[in-house]
Image (spheres, rainbow, N blue to C red):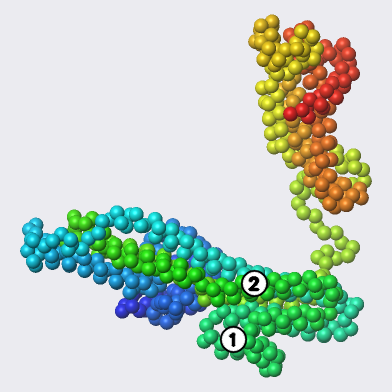
Amino acid sequence: ATWVLPRRGMYVLTAAFVNGFVAVPAARHPLPLRCSPVQALRPGSIKEATLQQGKRPYGEESRRYRRTIYRHEDWLRHRSETRLLRNLQGTFTSGVVRSLLSEVIAVTLVALLVIVWNAALFGYDSLGTTTTQPGLFGEEVPAFLRAQLPVSIFTLSSPALGLLLVFRTNTSYQRWLEARQAWGRIVSHCRNIMRQATLWIEEDEAEDVADPDAARRSLEELRLCVWAFPRSLWAHLSDPAKEPRFAQEVRERFPSDASAALLLGSSHRPLRALSLLSAAMDRLPIDEKKKVEMDKSCILLGDACETCERIFANPVPLVYTRHTARFLSAWLLLLPLGLWEGFGSSWNHLALLPAATVVSIFLFGIEELAVQLEEPFSILPLEALCEEVAVAADAMLEGRASARAPLVEAGRRATPPAQRGGVGPAMLLHAEDAGATLLAAALSATQQQERYFFAGGLCASLSHALATPIDVVKTKQQTRPEFRDLSLLDGLRRVAQADGPAALLTGVAPTVVGYGLEGACKFGVYEALKPASAPLLASLGLGADQSAAAGPVAAAVVAGGLASLVLAPAEATRIRMVSEPSYASLGLLGAASRLYEAEGTHAHAHSHTHAHTHALTP
């Protein structure tokens, strides 16, 4: 357990039970959660600043401690089961609440004035008795002097106030989010520039660069410029009081005072740093086409810089901000007048005081959150982001020698990954026979794509089984003249009257079996061949785009043809069972055997064209 003991507004001690009571110093190195029940402090957090300074920072001083970067331990604490109680405990020590002290006190004083005014004019309850004492002016005080408003005024106006607060908060959050995304692009493109330079300069070094040290110096200059741009933009968006620190860092990193003066003496340092970055890229001994690719990142860095400047220079329209603040202030200052009568059950309406105080804290707090988020750069972790760029640039420059080294030495084969089954692109590209490759894919599909076979067979068998009465009428219309001019309903009625309702299900067994196998083959084989078809076509000489477009079509053709071959015997048996009464009573196996004995495989193969056409018919 962790205790922070408040004394005269000062946080003076943190103690924990770790094999006895021990004092915990205010260190920047967090303790592992698994080693001690002491809560690890996040570097740069308000709690750490409280322990270091002996007091809790508030207001503008606290903004630099709100540049939150979470670690794994912080996320565990953020979603812990005790987070709600922990947040409630910190309500009155919250920086947001402390910054609203004057506004909350004003609302509380209005509530106290309402209670005193009404008690003085219209009477009050004596302490310890149930007797109501008359007011200072007796009982003949006019009712209009009572400090009270109808609560319906606040009920009707609260939706409008809520919408204003929601829009105000959302607008401020969108500004914060846009600023964070802009800085995310800055970090990403700075890394990208350094990555491209370290790879491409080494690729061309053997041919175009006579002096290897020249390449190294060019990369050192680029690394410096990659750091200088985000650092200059941070200083451009920060408090002018931090100018000495920025100047000191620039002089420490730049090779000479003259080169540092080029940046520090500029009226717009981010643009000067971007110009220095472009010039350093232009001096790199790499191909011009690759320089063009790198320059695209510089263009995007300029766009991100403009986004940050726009957010920093243009607040939410002041008329909107001021009207919301006036509406909220008037609403809360008048709220005690509307709540006074509702607290009549409490002694002299004194419960109005804490109620008005709590409501004002949370509603004023919403508007305060919007104000805090409106200018996001003083609460974003820009220092950490600049450090990320510098660390990434250093790491890429240090690993330049091995950046383009192959992971597998010449003459050696890479260790293959664990066999996962199926036919991958590598197997297809080395296959000598396309037919063998497709056969391998089909065999693999039976092992790896069971769900597609099962789902396709189940859906196809059920849907065609439900349509068996329609197939019976259709077959009779094709084979018996007396059914040709009948509609579907008349045909169903004629079959039921002539042969009984059970005749409408004639051939349901071959339908279920045949279309179950057909659906399994069609959908299962298609899903199995789809990832293998494009690499196969590419290995046969087709272009990449054409292979990607034609691959699924080829897989569908193969799957559809195979499915029709499987369907043909069952479809031939079904047609004979419907068209010839002597076959209907034999059942599936009996009818198929008799058909084979009478006409051989020709009867089943003859139905292949019909089955293929029927299968493609919706």
Residue 351 in the image: above or below residue 382: above
**What separation in Å lies between label 1 and label 2 (alpha carbons)?**
21 Å
The residue under the point 47% across, 76% down is 63
- Of discs 1 and 2, which sits in the foreground? 2
Q: Quadrant of residue 4?
A: bottom left
Quadrant containing the N terminus is: bottom left
Coordinates of residue 605 in the picture (x, y in percent): 87, 22
* Secondary-structure class at tag 2: helix
Q: Is residue 16 left or right of residue 147?
A: right
Most distant residue in the top direction: 498
Q: Nearer the viewer, residue 198 or 181?
A: 181
Asked if 531 appears above or below 412 in the picture, the reply is: above
Residue 443 shows up from this direction: no
Looking at the rendering, in which quadrant would you find the C terminus? top right
The answer to whether marks 1 and 2 mark residues whose Cβ atoms lie closer than 8 Å is no
40 horizontally vs 407: left or right: left
- Numbered tag placed on residue 304 in the rendering: 2
The residue type indicated by label 2 comes to Ala
The x, y position of residue 282, in whole percent, is 79, 80
Residue at 79% x, 10% y is 480
User: Residue at the spot x=84%, y=75% of the render?
Assistant: 288
Q: Which quadrant would residue 614 be assigned to in this image?
A: top right
Residue type at tag 1: Phe
Residue 506: give x, y in percent of width and height: 71, 14
* Number of other residues with Cα within 10 Å of mark 1, as a class: few under 14, some 14 to 19, many 20 or more: some
Q: Residues within 10 Å of mark 2 (few under 14, many from 20)?
A: many
Q: Mark 1 or 2 closer to N-term?
A: 1
| Residue at which label 1 appears | 246
Q: Which numbered marker is on residue 162?
A: none
Q: Secondary structure at mark 1?
A: helix
